[in-house]
Amino acid sequence: MMAPMAETAFMPPPGHGLISKLTSDDGDFRITWDPADPEQAENARQAFADLRRGGYSAYQVEGQRRTLIREFDPAAGAMHIVMHRANRGG
Amino acid sequence: MPVTFTSGNSSGATITVCRDPEADWLASCAQTTASFSATMNNLTAAITTASSAMTDFAGSWVPDCAPYSTASWVQASREETERLQAARQVADARAHVLLLSLLTSDQAESYQRHGWFVVLGSAGGWYRIRNQGQAGNVDELTGDGQRTATWCCHPPGGLPDADAHVAQLLQLQADEPGFRAAGNRTPRLLASRPLVTA
């Protein structure tokens, strides 16, 4: 059954980065940050590191280019990162 | 009425005891009542402790009011189920939107119209992700669209299906060898369903 289209795709504020953490409760939990704000960038880096330690995979999304990443680079500027618990065979 | 009991001992002396059976009975009753009361107090304290522990254990889910009402419990359970279903619908909708935002227009149209889309893996393999759950929903295809195998590889944790399809899509596009290393592959006969057209 197709889910109802309740909203359009989430867009972070211009120039901001976005981490979409896939969750069962929310669909995705979103963290945005302003690369020009060191505190926000550090918070995003910390969230990224915590999720990686928790077994999450991370993919940087740039249009149709997708890259598996293991480190968060605050200097890379705004980017969209999708994180989910690692796939495994059922 | 007092009763006199008489008995002898080894020295031959006679001991006479005057007792009142009614007083004995009352004393016995008082002792039994006290013992019963103490037992009940201990039992009540134990039940109170256990009840408190149960409430702490189960949190607010267990109604802690008395008298216990089955009807109110059923109602609370139904409301909780409806709340969870509503939350799940919101999660499903958000996951669906995220997935569509990551697909090409052709993939998105195919997913909405047919319930599947085709992905080119990072190592050159072709895959079809079907919107039919998240276990065993990834088909491995030949270049001309014939299914050769089915893959079971998805995130744990009961994500909405569309979120699982996002995870499958991203790993295939960015790390196809990792997907194949993590998943379980079931070979399928060729020519079962021609699906991909140029």
Image (spheres, coloured by chain):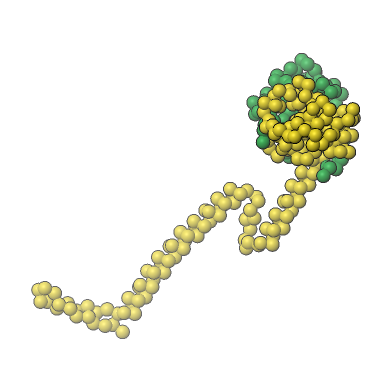
Note the chain letter of the yellow one.
B
Q: Is residue B113 left or right of residue A27?
A: right
Task: Specify the farthest residue to the top.
Answer: A75
| Near-viewer residue (B31 or B56) | B56
Q: Residue at x 27, y 78 (%)?
A: B19
Residue B143 is drawn in which quadrant? top right
Q: Is residue A39 visible?
A: no
* Residue B114 in the image: above or below residue A68: below
Note the chain letter of the green one.
A
Q: Is residue B11 left or right of residue B61?
A: left
Residue A6 in percent (x, y) is at 86, 40
Task: Specify the farthest residue to the left.
Answer: B11
| Near-viewer residue (A4 or B56) | A4
Q: Residue at x 73, y 51 (%)?
A: B81
Residue A26 in percent (x, y) is at 76, 38
| Near-viewer residue (A53 or B173) | B173
* Residue B71 in the image: above or below residue B1: above
Residue B3 in percent (x, y) is at 26, 83
Q: Is residue B114 left or right of residue B5?
A: right
Q: Residue at x 89, y 38 (%)?
A: B113
* Residue B37 in the image: above or below residue B161: below
Q: Quarter of the image containing the N terminus of chain B? A: bottom left
Q: Quarter of the image containing the C terminus of chain B? A: top right
Q: Residue at x 42, y 66 (%)?
A: B36
| Near-viewer residue (B65 or B97) | B97
